[in-house]
């Protein structure tokens, strides 16, 4: 079986968010299960600076792709040594696609969508590579709206491979004015009210991908259900997703169980395990010293937050309960970048509680590991969360999560208040300060019962969320499509 995995970003070369992590880890996990995988991704100007292995590239194909009535020169590049068993193909087109990064060009902000030409050219490059590379791909696995247009393009090829589209977040759909239609190179008759390209008199790239893909996945079963039933999650695609329900699956993401493990993480010392929880106490003490918090507070519950400072992540809920939290015997550390107003509010909070609160308006990978490993409680009150990874990292490190019951958070965290023998954290449903505080106070109360708390820590640490399991689910989907069957996901 040979898979082409298409993504706009991939760690460690061009990671911006969670998609970059998935694009690295899932192909590697597939490769370890004897699946031949090629990653196809854009070439960005900054890549040679970020990775020595990308400083010597070779061109494996050159051609021109049609756009705006003219031919646009495109090259497909590969490093001389990929190194980990997964082939890497980079698409180089400097005007529209190969810019400074996946979603930015010059002064553009990552908060704004790409121009449609980038996604159109990348989709055409994917289809052209499938048609002319000679690789005979079994399945093309697309990711997000940036690659979704490749689905209808591939279906126009003779002997087209099966197509899987993973939607990591339905909040990003690639919706553009209908004037973009001539650039697509797709049949004009596909644009009609309710048709594969039309979306409220505009063009929706994600909808086109959903329409023409053989299977669609998203990153948790609860998020799948939310997307099909509620506008706030599906954002206009609820009906379309219901029509594809039999070919729409929820597959929870995995985590790197070497990097995000208390036994092996390169960022913490000492390493610990469920049988050596005393060492987590030392990790916490060292973290307090690193943050400049009082050493005597090591017996006080340390509450951690690592998030983007945007409303979706529930930062307003954290600010709403922070004073009440710090009125208890508790410490709070927040790491995150984003909205300037939220940053200012957090700084003011830190100034009022200099011995109880630390705010880090930046992201550092190593420190994020140490915070997750050294904390006792992790807060994740997201308004929506397709999958979520921080709650999985927390479980692995014996740090008890407090989450909103939505998406992947609902699928991975069991509320210990209602399931005392199997609970791994605490959750709440209504996105209100009152509901959130009840869950937080439940965690603070449980922390005082040390035997109960240690049992909960160990339950979380014993859970396995390795990419190996996610890869098996995708392999089952691939095999079913190749065999002409309707996929099933356990």
Image (cartoon, rainbow, N blue to C red):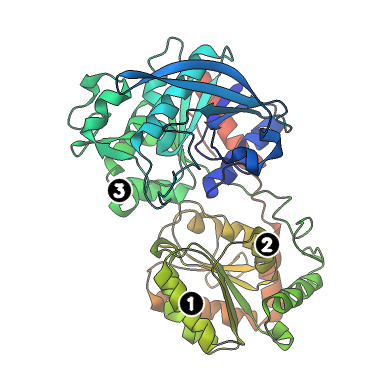
Mark 2 Cα shell of 10 Å, populated few (<14), some (14-19), many (≥20): many
Mark 3 Cα shell of 10 Å, populated few (<14), some (14-19), many (≥20): some
Gap between marks 2 and 3 measured at Cα:
34 Å
Instruction: Write down the quadrant of residue 194 in the picture.
Output: top left
- At which x and y percent is residue 290? 71, 75
Q: Of residues 254 and 105, which is closer to you in this image? A: 105
2 or 1: tag closer to the N-terminus: 1
Q: Secondary structure at mark 1?
A: helix
Instruction: Write down the quadrant of residue 27 in the picture.
Output: top right
Residue under label 2, please give it.
369
Q: Residue placed at 55% from the left, 37% from the top?
A: 45
Residue under label 1, please give it.
346
Q: Of residues 100 and 333, which is closer to you in this image? A: 100
2 or 3: tag closer to the N-terminus: 3
3 or 1: tag closer to the N-terminus: 3
- At which x and y percent is residue 121? 41, 27
Q: Residue placed at 33% from the left, 30% from the top?
A: 208
Q: Residue placed at 45% from the left, 15% from the top?
A: 160
Select label 2 or label 3 by which is in front: 2
Q: Is residue 110 left or right of residue 78?
A: left
Select label 2 or label 1 by which is in front: 1
Numbered mark located on residue 235 in the image: 3
- Residue 36 visible, this angle: no
Determine contact: label 2, label 1, CB under 8 Å: no
Q: Of residues 486 and 8, which is closer to you in this image? A: 8
Q: Is residue 346 left or right of residue 261?
A: left
- Residue 310 visible, this angle: yes
Gap between marks 2 and 1 measured at Cα:
21 Å
Q: Secondary structure at mark 3?
A: loop
């Amino acid at each position: 079986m040979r898979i082409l995995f298409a993504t706009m970003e991939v760690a460690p070369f061009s990671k911006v968010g969670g998609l970059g992590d998935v694009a690295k880890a899932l192909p590697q996990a597939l490769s370890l299960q004897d699946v031949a995988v090629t990653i196809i991704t854009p070439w960005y100007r900054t890549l040679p600076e970020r990775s020595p292995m990308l400083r010597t590239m070779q061109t494996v194909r050159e051609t021109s792709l049609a756009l705006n009535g003219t031919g646009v020169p495109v090259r497909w590049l590969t490093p001389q040594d990929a190194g980990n068993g997964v082939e890497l193909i980079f698409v180089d087109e400097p005007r529209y696609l190969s810019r400074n990064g996946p979603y930015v060009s010059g002064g553009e902000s990552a908060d704004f969508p790409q121009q449609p030409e980038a996604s159109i050219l990348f989709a055409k490059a994917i289809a052209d590579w499938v048609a002319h590379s000679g690789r005979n791909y079994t399945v093309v696995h697309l990711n997000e709206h940036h690659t979704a247009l490749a689905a209808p393009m591939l279906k126009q090829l003779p002997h087209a491979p099966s197509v899987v589209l993973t939607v990591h977040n339905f909040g990003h759909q690639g919706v553009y004015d209908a004037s973009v239609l001539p650039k697509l190179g797709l049949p004009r008759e596909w644009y009609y009210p309710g048709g594969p390209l039309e979306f409220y008199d505009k063009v929706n790239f994600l909808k086109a991908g959903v329409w023409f893909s053989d299977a669609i996945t998203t990153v948790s079963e609860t998020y799948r259900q939310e997307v099909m039933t509620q506008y706030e999650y599906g954002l206009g695609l609820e009906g379309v997703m219901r029509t594809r329900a039999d070919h729409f699956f929820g597959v929870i993401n995995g985590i790197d169980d070497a990097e995000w493990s208390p036994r092996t993480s390169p960022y913490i010392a000492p390493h610990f395990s469920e049988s050596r929880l005393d060492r987590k106490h030392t990790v916490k003490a060292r973290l307090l010293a690193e943050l400049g918090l009082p050493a005597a507070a090591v017996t006080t519950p340390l509450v951690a937050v690592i998030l983007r400072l945007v409303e979706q992540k529930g930062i307003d809920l954290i600010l709403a309960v922070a004073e009440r939290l710090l009125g208890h015997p508790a410490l709070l550390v927040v790491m995150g970048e984003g909205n300037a107003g939220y940053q200012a509010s957090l700084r003011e909070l830190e100034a009022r509680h200099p011995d109880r609160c630390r705010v880090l308006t930046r992201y550092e990978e190593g420190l994020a590991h140490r915070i997750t490993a050294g904390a006792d409680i992790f807060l994740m009150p997201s308004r929506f969360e397709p999958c979520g990874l921080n709650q999985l990292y927390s479980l692995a490190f014996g740090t008890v999560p407090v989450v909103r019951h939505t998406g992947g958070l609902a699928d991975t965290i069991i509320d210990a208040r209602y399931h005392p023998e199997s609970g791994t954290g605490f959750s709440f449903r209504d996105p209100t300060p009152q509901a959130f505080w009840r869950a937080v106070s439940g965690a603070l109360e449980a922390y005082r019962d040390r035997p109960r708390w240690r049992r909960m820590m160990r339950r979380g640490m014993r859970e396995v969320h390795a990419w190996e399991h996610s890869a098996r689910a995708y392999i089952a989907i691939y095999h079913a499509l190749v065999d002409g069957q309707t996929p099933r996901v356990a």
